[in-house]
Image (cartoon, rainbow, N blue to C red):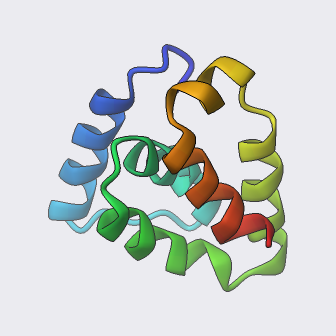
Amino acid sequence: RQKEDWQRIVDLGDQALSEKLNSDDWVEWIPFIQAYAYMEDYDAANELASLVRYNHYTRQQACNSYKLVSENIQQQFPDGHKYLIDTFCN
């Protein structure tokens, strides 16, 4: 995420999902949801978002995280960014 290598994040997310890996802290899925949205894989983003959205605190963390992305990223991935804001902030 720090390197903004969204495809690499998607690849790692696909691997984690295929191996049925989990986390006790659903906040750890936030970068994967972001990468899936930016790569326009909304099915995968929705699958993970459903795990994060149920908890108010986690949903708020996701919203805050996505609101803080740079203007450059927002312009580069407008549809993905809109998806994230609509999904977690509205």
- Please name whichever residue, 79 or 43, is drawn nearer the observer in this view of the structure: 79
Q: Is residue 39 above or below residue 42?
A: above
- Which corner quadrant holds the C terminus? bottom right
Percent of width and height locating residue 35: 43, 42
The quarter of the displayed image where residue 89 is located: bottom right
- Please name whichever residue, 2 or 35, is drawn nearer the observer in this view of the structure: 35
Task: Kindly identify the residue that appears in the image at 73 percent across and 23 percent down.
Answer: 71
Which residue lies most toward the bottom here?
54
Task: Kindly identify the residue that appears in the image at 82 percent across and 79 percent down.
Answer: 56
- Please name whichever residue, 3 or 87, is drawn nearer the observer in this view of the structure: 87
Q: Is residue 32 above or below residue 69?
A: below
Residue 50 seen in the current view? yes
Task: Kindly identify the residue that appears in the image at 57 percent across and 59 percent down.
Answer: 83
Percent of width and height locating residue 3: 49, 14
Percent of width and height locating residue 69: 72, 31
Q: Is residue 30 left or right of residue 4?
A: right
Q: Is residue 74 left or right of residue 43?
A: right
Q: Is residue 40 left or right of residue 80?
A: left
Task: Kindly identify the residue that appears in the image at 67 percent across and 85 percent down.
Answer: 54
Percent of width and height locating residue 15: 19, 49
Q: Is residue 58 left or right of residue 8?
A: right
- Total numbered labels: 0
Residue 25 seen in the current view? no
Q: Is residue 6 above or below residue 39?
A: above
The quarter of the displayed image where residue 42 is located: bottom left
